[in-house]
Image (cartoon, rainbow, N blue to C red):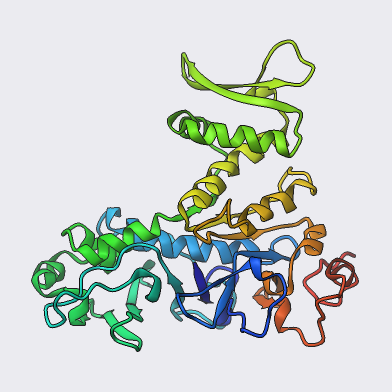
């Protein structure tokens, strides 16, 4: 789960913003909506994090920050040498030449690597360790490249935060003994590029900690990428065809949310997989191209949600409410609250325009984005606004302008 996200000089976010999801022990209402940040911690984080605000206020930018970190950690070594990184700073005045800064604190269910030789036989429990990853990018000579990078952890045997590695502006990497870099350091110095992460580079050398972190990054399932793209229905159908258990799961959920569909089936066609839908009262199945936009949108995001719930991790969904009925949205949230449906405390990050969803959320789950006159995005949580009570009608107060982040018309 993500505990906090820091964004500075990235796309529409000009100033430094820290989205700290921490919930204190005194909050005991709706306990099923929160999970321990790590084993034995008094700090909890919400399982659902929702961002609201006007169009172009920067909601998607928050999710893109997560996706950029994920991509950079996992896949940046695949970039060709001398290729500029696909990351944009704030385009307004006053920050020319300033670095882009992204940081994320998280825990993972992936198994921690064996302890170093000076701690023989010690295996660190994955439930008691969390990480903090920080990266800075610079824009210089018309190229976007890495300026610095660092990874920290809190293993149970250390009882404190330790540095795993740090990379400076010259590309030099220093690491603690826990990171096990010694036998790879010489080769790393030769092949590390200014457009690739240390982790994605070391993974090519079969460095076990880096391979573990790459595996952890694959637990982030998102419907947005470095560049927004149109829905790829062929990829969606290929996923369902390769994972028939998800077809069964989707059929159960389709019938529960009453889209008028009895079942979906996927079969091989002359140009790839095709889907047909059996409807109540119809004598023949309906092919996917004739289904409603809402049904197709639901099926597009469904693999991200179902895979995350089944295996744990984080689902990052931009515009979850796009063409999906307002009464269906709370049901999707309930999947993440359910211990049976979400046994590994998977987390859901969403942007949403349908503000009626505010009536279904607690104040710890709600964040707003709005832009100032200079085009910079501000990000703030409802829990940080003084005077907000749990019994308040968040929908009515938001629509009345009490929380800000509403469009100005006229």
Relative horizontal placement of residue 160, taking residue 287 as reference (left or right): left
Q: Position of residue 324 (x, y in %)?
A: 73, 44
| Residue 233 image position (x, y, % from top left) | 55, 33
Depth order, front residue of 146/280 = 280
The x, y position of residue 269, in whole percent, is 49, 15
Image position of 299 with respect to 29: above or below: above
- Among the 4 quarters of the image, the one containing residue 77: bottom left
Regarding residue 186, the answer to whether it shows in the image is: yes
Q: Tell whether 169 sits left or right of 13.
A: left
Residue 270 is left or right of residue 175, and the answer is right
Q: Report x, y in % for residue 32.
A: 65, 66
- Tell me which residue sits at (36%, 81%) in the image: 154
| x 31%, y 85%: residue | 162
Q: Residue at x 46, y 81 (%)?
A: 98
Query: In the rendered image of this protein, does residue 194 appear above or below residue 339?
Result: below
Q: Is residue 134 visible?
A: no
């Amino acid at each position: 789960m993500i505990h906090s996200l820091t964004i500075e000089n990235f796309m529409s976010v000009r100033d430094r913003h820290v989205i700290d999801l921490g919930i204190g022990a005194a909050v005991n209402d709706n306990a099923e909506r929160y999970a321990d940040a790590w084993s034995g911690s008094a700090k909890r984080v919400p399982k659902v994090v929702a961002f609201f605000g006007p169009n172009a206020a920067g909601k998607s930018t928050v999710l893109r920050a997560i996706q950029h970190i994920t991509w950079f950690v996992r896949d940046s070594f695949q970039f060709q040498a001398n290729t500029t990184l696909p990351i944009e700073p704030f385009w307004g005045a006053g920050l020319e030449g300033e670095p882009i800064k992204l940081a994320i604190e998280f825990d993972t269910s992936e198994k921690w690597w064996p302890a170093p030789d000076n701690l023989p036989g010690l295996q660190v429990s994955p439930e008691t360790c969390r990480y903090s990853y920080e990266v800075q990018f610079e824009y210089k000579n018309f190229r976007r490249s890495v300026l610095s990078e660092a990874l920290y952890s809190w293993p149970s045997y250390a009882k404190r935060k330790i540095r795993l590695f740090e990379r400076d502006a010259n590309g030099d990497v220093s690491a603690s003994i826990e990171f096990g870099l010694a036998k790879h350091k010489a080769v790393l110095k030769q092949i590390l590029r200014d457009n690739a992460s240390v982790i994605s580079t070391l993974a090519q050398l079969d460095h076990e900690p880096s391979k573990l972190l790459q595996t952890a990054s694959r637990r982030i399932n998102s419907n947005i990428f470095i560049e927004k793209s149109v829905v790829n229905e062929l990829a969606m159908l290929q996923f369902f065809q390769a994972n028939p258990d998800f077809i069964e799961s989707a059929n159960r959920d389709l019938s529960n949310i009453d889209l008028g569909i009895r079942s979906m089936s996927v079969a091989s066609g002359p140009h790839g997989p095709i889907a047909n839908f059996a409807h109540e009262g119809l004598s023949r199945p309906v092919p996917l191209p004739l289904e409603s936009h809402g049904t197709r949108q639901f099926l597009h995001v469904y693999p991200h949600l179902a895979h995350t719930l089944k295996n744990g991790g984080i689902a990052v969904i931009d515009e979850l409410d796009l063409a999906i009925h307002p009464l269906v949205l709370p049901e999707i949230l309930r999947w993440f609250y359910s211990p049976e449906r979400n046994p590994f405390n998977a987390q859901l990050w969403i942007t949403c325009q349908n503000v009626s969803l505010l009536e279904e959320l607690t104040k710890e789950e709600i964040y707003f984005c709005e832009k100032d006159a200079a085009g910079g995005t501000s990000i703030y949580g409802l829990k940080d606004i003084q005077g907000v009570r749990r019994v308040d009608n968040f929908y009515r107060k938001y629509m009345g302008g009490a929380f800000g982040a509403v469009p100005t018309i006229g």
